[in-house]
Image (tube, rainbow, N blue to C red):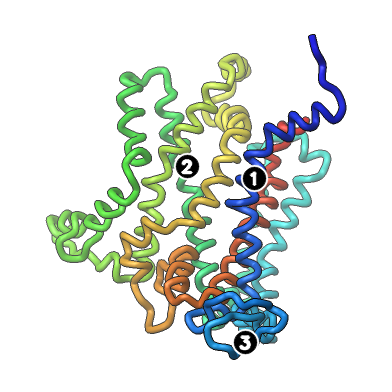
Amino acid sequence: MITLKGWRKTVIILGFLLPTLLGVIVFSLYPVLFNVFISFTNRNLSHYRPPESMLTCSPDDFGTYCWNAPLFGNYARLFGPLMTRASLAAWARLLMLMLPWLGVYMITRRRGYRTMTAADTWWVWPLAFAFSYAIWSLAGGQAAINHLMNSGDFFIVMFRTFLYVALCLPFFVITGGVLAIILSNDHIRAKPLFRTVLILPWAVPSYITAKIWQFFFRSEHGTINQVLGIFGIQGPAWLQTDMLAFGAVVLINVWLSYPFFMTVIMGGLQTISRDLYEAAEVDGANWWQQLRQITIPMLRPAVMPAIVLSAITTFQMFNTVWLVTDRGGPTRGAGRPGATEFVMLYAYKQFRSQNYGAISAFSVVVFLLLFGATLLSLRLTRITKGAYE
């Protein structure tokens, strides 16, 4: 048997990795770096051609683009209204809401709590929510939100997008988990039929589902309002009202995404040994106790990666919202983002204006936020811990 040592082994390993590394550099790293470069320039419809030298070009020359003046001008237009004294005070009041959650995190990191399961410490989360609500009421959280909402498009778009993600994820997990537990019950017959039917929303192309749901939510001839009319109820204008349109796109996204979580959780349930449940029954544990002490903790390694991936996907939602709400509507006035105009819709509209420097700065900020949120989630959930042990 011939063994390869030293540099020969390194060369062979790099040879296998080289195609992937080249693909990452060409299709991922280079676009990111070029986008960062454009974010510091004045490139737009009037300045579109690369100059011979960025050191000698003039920002006023027609046709060529140059370094922005000031250099961080595109970023200043995004963050400037959020950095005033009043805005910083509003940020401080909102950050106070995180103190109870930070306290919960610090408490659960103690040695005594680390030996307990998540089901044992469930009570700390409602307590943190109660403290956060008290701080919200006393510190004027709504007034802080209203001030930041009036500070520019950047905060409005980001706030609505994060709220959209935060509302969707719990419904993903709960809906998919309930259906997975039901379909894993030994008393359910025709399981393959039910699983096939329930996975259809995930299999059907999203643009078809979006147009179907848009027909459901139409004001005059929509299916939902026609059903309400049978009972003498005047249905609202679902997609012309801010809150109702927002709730509609949340519902549609849950419909599209719950089969993924149902499939993941069903797979996770298959990995849990039946001996654990039999031992729990012998000890007198009821169904709820088995769910809290066995099922939920054992499903965590399977569910947490799905939550992180779904959060990123939901943050980048475009086609469904675009088709259902007619480009992010309802509109809220000229030059203002629509009620459902999330990050990707806003970025697309800005890209159509061809102000490439400004939209590049916006995309860099979004990239950094997503990258930071992903690293933080990996750190807090420890979903990759087993891969390095």
Real-space Cα distance between discs 1 and 2? Answer: 41 Å
Q: Which residue, given by chain and number where applicable, does mark 1 sit on?
A: 22
In the displayed structure, does residue 190 sit left or right of residue 306? left
Secondary structure, mark 1, is: helix
Looking at the rendered structure, the secondary structure element under dot 2 is: helix
Spatial distance from mark 1 to mark 3, Cα to Cα? 35 Å
Contact check, label 1 and label 3, Cβ < 8 Å? no
Residue 128: x, y in percent? 66, 56
CA–CA distance in space, label 3 to label 2: 54 Å
Q: Residues within 10 Å of mark 3 (few under 14, many from 20)?
A: some
Residue 16 location, quadrant: top right
Task: Tell me which label, 1 or 2, sits earlier in the chain.
Answer: 1
Nearest to the observer: residue 232 or residue 284: 232
Residue furthest bottom in the image:
60
Q: Disc 3 vs disc 2: which is toward the camera?
A: 3
Q: In the rendering, at what x and y percent does residue 217 appear?
A: 25, 59
Which amino acid type is shown beneath numbered disc 1? Leu
* Quadrant of the frame with the C terminus: top right
- Residue closest to the eye, 8 or 282: 8
> At 38% from the left edge and 46% from the top edge, which residue is drawn?
256
Amino acid type for the residue under numbered disc 3:
Pro
Q: Amino acid at mark 2?
A: Ile
- Residue situated furthest top in the rendering: 1
- Quarter occupied by residue 135: bottom right
Where's the N terminus, which quadrant?
Answer: top right
Quadrant of res 185: top left
Which numbered disc flags the more N-terminal residue, 3 or 2?
3
The numbered dot on residue 59 is 3
Q: Which mark is residue 174?
A: 2
